[in-house]
Amino acid sequence: MSTELSKPAVTGPDAPPEPAPRQAAATRPAATRLRRRRRRLGPGRPIPFGWAIGPALLLAVWAMGSAAGLIDERNLSAPWDVVATAGELIEEGRLQDHLWASTERALSGLAFGVAAGLVLALVAGLSRLGEGVIDGPVQIKRSIPSLALIPLLILWFGIGESMKVITITLGVLVPIYIHTHHGLRGIDSRYVELAETLRLSRWAFLRHVVLPGALPGFLLGLRFAVTSAWLSLVVVEQVNATSGIGYMMELARTYGQTDVILVGLVVYGLLGLISDGLVRLAQRRALSWQRTLAD
């Protein structure tokens, strides 16, 4: 008979405490992990190349639908046909020429729109009289799409490059003004009182208080502005244009070339995605002091 079996059991108040059940010890790390999970209320850590998940899924659905024959090629060409058509356009040099013409128009309209929107936001944000004069017309323009002004702009400026650049400028101006003005008016009034107490000059007040306070709103408006520039470009290049991605798509529509139209759409999408990514990168660098859910 073993020693363990012969050992008498001790009961009563003098009995030693029983060891904790092994099951409780095993579940303790799980409970700790659960508490840690509950503490994370944010979106979590950034996923590497997370921005590409949505486009990759869309491309996968498109490819599977084309391969299975669920998508009629007359309505929507297969991805591999679009890639082959893009290769042919690049070899012929047509895609580069149209892309350069579109980029030149978009950058011109973006530069004029950003400058005008920023100046108007500063004037309206730092002066009650300026706000009374500027804010109303900009809000009216906000409710009227820039594309709805194209007939009037054609009568005023013709159908040349001026009309196209002005249409893009009007589309860019509004988001820059709205977000910069909002950011500027959102500056804590205590900073203004501190600047007055320190007797800062007008220029020092703009440099140390106004511009840093309005920067987050300006960068957010810039993200909307670059998207508006490309959206406006799609339309204006289909109005009596002889170059540009929009002209190439309009010409392809005449001949029923859906693959060329899709090449243009993909180019527009990539331009918008790259532009937004560059602005977000600049935003992250400029606002490195700001901790948000995106971090």
Image: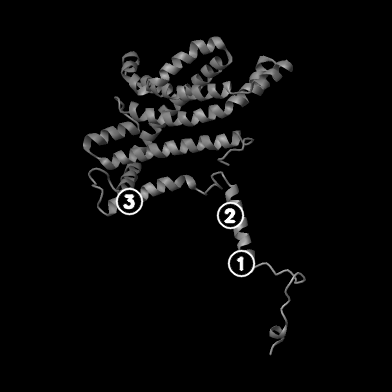
Give whichever of discs 2 and 1 has the lower sequence position: 1
Q: Amino acid at mark 3?
A: Ala
In the rendered view, tell whether residue 89 sits above or below residue 192: below
Name the residue at 29% across, 51% down: 65
Residue that carries the numbered disc 2 in the rendered image: 34
Pointer 1: residues within 10 angstroms few (<14), some, or many (20+)?
A: few
Circle 3 residue? 63
Identify the residue shown where x is 62% and y is 56%.
32
In the foreground, 73 or 27 = 27
Tell me the residue that label 1 is attached to: 23
Residue kind at label 2, given as amino acid type: Leu
Q: Is residue 279 visible?
A: yes
Give the distance between the C-alpha atoms of the residues marked 3 and 1, in whole angstroms. Answer: 51 Å
Dot 3: within a 10 Å radius of its alpha carbon, few (fewer than 14), some, or many (20 or more) residues? Answer: some
Residue ID at (34%, 13%): 156
Residue 227 in the image, given as x and y percentages of width and height: 43, 31
Residue 93 visible at all: no
Whether the residues at callouts 2 and 1 have beta carbons within 8 Å, the answer is no
Against 151, is 56 above or below?
below
Say which label, 3 or 2, has the lower sequence index.
2
Closer to us: mark 2 or mark 1?
A: 1
- The spot of residue 290 in percent (x, y) is 62, 35
Looking at the rendered image, the quarter that the N terminus falls into is bottom right
Q: Position of residue 283 (x, y in %)?
A: 56, 34
Q: CA distance from mark 3 to mark 2?
A: 40 Å
